[in-house]
Amino acid sequence: MSLSSVLRFYRFPSKQLVISATAIRYVSSASNKGSSSSCLSYPGKPKHSSSYQAIVIGAGHNGLVAAAYLQLAGFKKVCVLERRHVVGGAAVTEEIIPGFHFSRASYLLSLLRPSIINDLELKKHGLKLHLRDPSSYTPLSTNHWKTEGARSLTLSSDIEFNRKQISKFSKHDAEAYENYEKWLSRLVAAIDPLIDSKTIDLNFPGSFYSNVKSLMAVAKSAYKLRKEIGSFYDLMTAPASKLLDQFFESEPLKATLATDAVIGAMMGPHSIGSGYVLLHHVMGGVEGKQGAWAYPEGGMGAVSNAMAKSAVEKGATIFTDQTVKEIMVGDDGSVAGVRLDDETEIFSKVVLSNATPHVTFVNLLPSGALPESYLNKVKSVDYTSPVTKINVALNALPNFLADPHQTLGMGKAAPHHRCTIHLNCEESHMLNKAFQQGQQGLIPDRPMIEMTIPSSLDSTISPKGCHVALLFTQYTPYELQNGVQWDDHWKEVYAKRIFQQIDEYAPGFQQSIVGYEVLTPPDLERIFGLTGGNIFHGAISLDQLYLSRPFSSWKAHNQRDHYPSLPRTPIKGLYICGSGAHPGGGVMGTPGRLAAEIVVEESRR
């Protein structure tokens, strides 16, 4: 499909990039390849009947991490096969509107483990991060302005700054916030050993040392939690709203913090288990600053580019535009390689899949390759997604009524433009109402909106004086009520609702739009291979964590035997290296590293 057929209704700006404020046009996401990309492509084609020491399906960030670590461990020939025309999976940068480079799916970096950055020398390969501080901005709509003058809430890494901001709404909460952050920090430190280690496989395969290492990680976490076990139990089982109520009394603070508990999850702040999602999103950090988030220069594709360069430098071979049709299984039940769409066969005794467990086990494996009881577990995984991502090109920064900015005409960003901007988040009940409407198949009256403007810190991704706005919105169902599908009409209806509501906070926003793209859950599934549109490769819920990521390993209620825990699978030589395995989603890289470590360990037996 040509570029012109993808950018339907878009009016191209002049060569001088004097972009008309009337050129608001919808960009269809119908094509998988209709955009220019800042991500790397690796043209070429593997030879029929060629063989490799390991094959990685999918050049998303975890697949690239796995390939790089395999090469580091001494593997001589690792092949990475990517369905799309670029590497990166959901961590890509693409030029949807000419001159505007969007982090098209994932959009912020924090969870990527420092050890991976160092081991793979990602900074040497071009990774540069723009740390955000302040990090969170919640403007209030005019009907929520407080009589005492409070109109917005901004949070940063500065304790005194936060105290002054929160005290506008509650003196009590201003003092409680530091205790809340310290509590979360202690819990993050306690579970950190579990994030970087393999789960305990109840079959206890492999070496004694390998199993003891996993057990020691659990013991280390348990020791650190010895004085926090009660509050940790609450965090894992209670709704986020209940936890926040124990610390705070005021809005919009509770609603702002609750967004971390529901982001990317079909949960409301009152949903059981939403507390853990809150922890999942604060367990990262940037440049040694816990909980910090950053914009990678050049967009999220720059992270994947650095990983790809690292893997290739270490000897891996990457092929883009190569769709795996089937994982081949030999007569002995072990993996034999892969077959591509054009029937090219590539052989290997080791295959790592960076696709979701559903795609790997249901779509790629031949019928009958897996035990029926295992396949039933695969099919039971919850992939529900509430997310619609809207990528917007702007010819001006939004000017918020709550905090008018006088230098916008010069294109200069204020500190709050660099934050995650929370809209429709004045009160927690607004989030819960949007969640309930989404569950019913409705477009919420007031969707939850998280806006980021990475061009406020990174001038490389938009024309001078213009900006990229990324809108992470929810709650949008996979299909609308009564089976109505997300066609271009309904996407435009939804986008206009979002834009009109942003206008309530920042009048003139709609007039500043040059073009935009709407990615609903089915679009995220089709373009990026995210089953159900779920950004985590399966919901981050209590029944889909650690030993049960993304399903439990026991064979049946009346049996003591267990299937292998992911990344191992019942098929010898086949591993899951994507976010469907422990520790889960986010641009973290740990699932890829852990899968590679297990492959190396088993290859040396």
Image: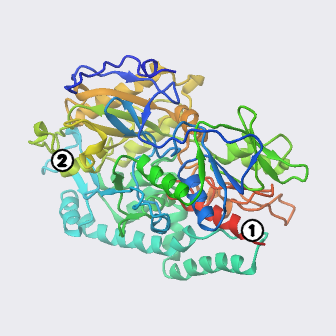
Left or right side of 520 for 348: right
From the viewer's side, name the closer residue of 290 and 104.
104
Residue toward you, 172 or 524: 524
As drawn, the label of residue 184 is: none
Would you say the residues marked 1 and 2 are in contact, meaning their CB atoms lie under 8 Å apart? no
Residue 231 placement, left or right of 449: right
Residue occupied by mark 1: 602
Residue type highlighted by circle 2 = Arg
Residue occupying the point 46% across, 18% down: 5
Among all residues in the image, which is located at the extreme left? 406
Q: How is the image coloured?
A: rainbow
Quadrant of the image occupied by residue 6: top left
The residue beneath circle 2 is 151
Does residue 393 sit above or below 164 in this rendering? above
Q: Is residue 156 above or below residue 320?
A: below
Amino acid identity at mark 1: Glu
Q: In percent of the image, x 23 and y 35: which residue is there?
A: 466
Q: Position of residue 603 (x, y in %)?
A: 75, 67
Residue positioned 19% across, 40% down in the render: 400
